[in-house]
Image: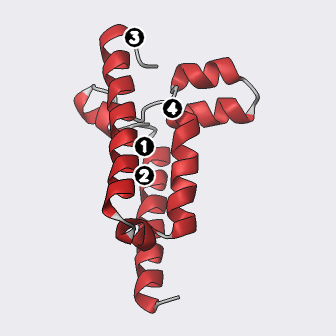
Amino acid sequence: MNKKIVKKHVFLICVLALYVFIVYITGIGCPLRYVTGIPCPTCGMTRAYLSFLSFDFKTAFYFHPLFLLAFPFALLLVHFNLDTFLHMKRKPRNTILILMLILFWAVYAVRLLFFTIP
């Protein structure tokens, strides 16, 4: 593996660890919701996974109905490497990204308009 890629991955992991540490210590949960009062498109994702791991599927889908899509998508990015994904043919890559964005924003809009996001 290239040293530059390793450094980038280590940096991203450190930033993520720092973020989790700060959120855990302060207890604010979602920073966007804490600052603006408006939940982010992925609000409820962690609670959905925790419910899913407890075999509480109804609650998992209540917290975030698209939680099952996020993990496989992240695995695809890791498996194919983000650089490989970004260099794949433009049409399939754009189709995947656009579909994911449309799904997440549509669910986000429906949840904001019609439901109280937990």
Is residue 53 shown above or below 13? above
Q: Residues within 10 Å of mark 1 (few under 14, many from 20)?
A: few
Tell me which residue sits at (30%, 12%) in the image.
113
Q: Which residue is mark 3?
A: 115
Alpha carbon separation for disc pair 4 and 3: 15 Å
Say which of marks 4 and 2 sits in front: 4
Q: Amino acid at mark 4?
A: Leu
Badge 2 amino acid: Ile
**Residue at image coords 43%, 82%:** 5
| Circles 1 and 4: CB atoms closer than 8 Å | no
Q: Which mark is residue 98?
A: none
Going by the numbered disc 3, the residue's amino acid type is Phe
Q: Is residue 31 above or below residue 64?
A: below
Numbered disc in front, either 3 or 1: 3
Q: Are marks 2 and 1 in contact (CB under 8 Å)?
A: yes
Foreground: disc 3 or disc 2? 3
Residue linked to disc 2: 22
Observer-nearest of 25 and 102: 102
Secondary structure of the residue carrying tag 4 is: loop
- Give the residue type that dot 1 points to: Thr
Place residue 33 in its image quadrant.
Answer: top left
Residue 103 at x, y = what percent? 39, 32
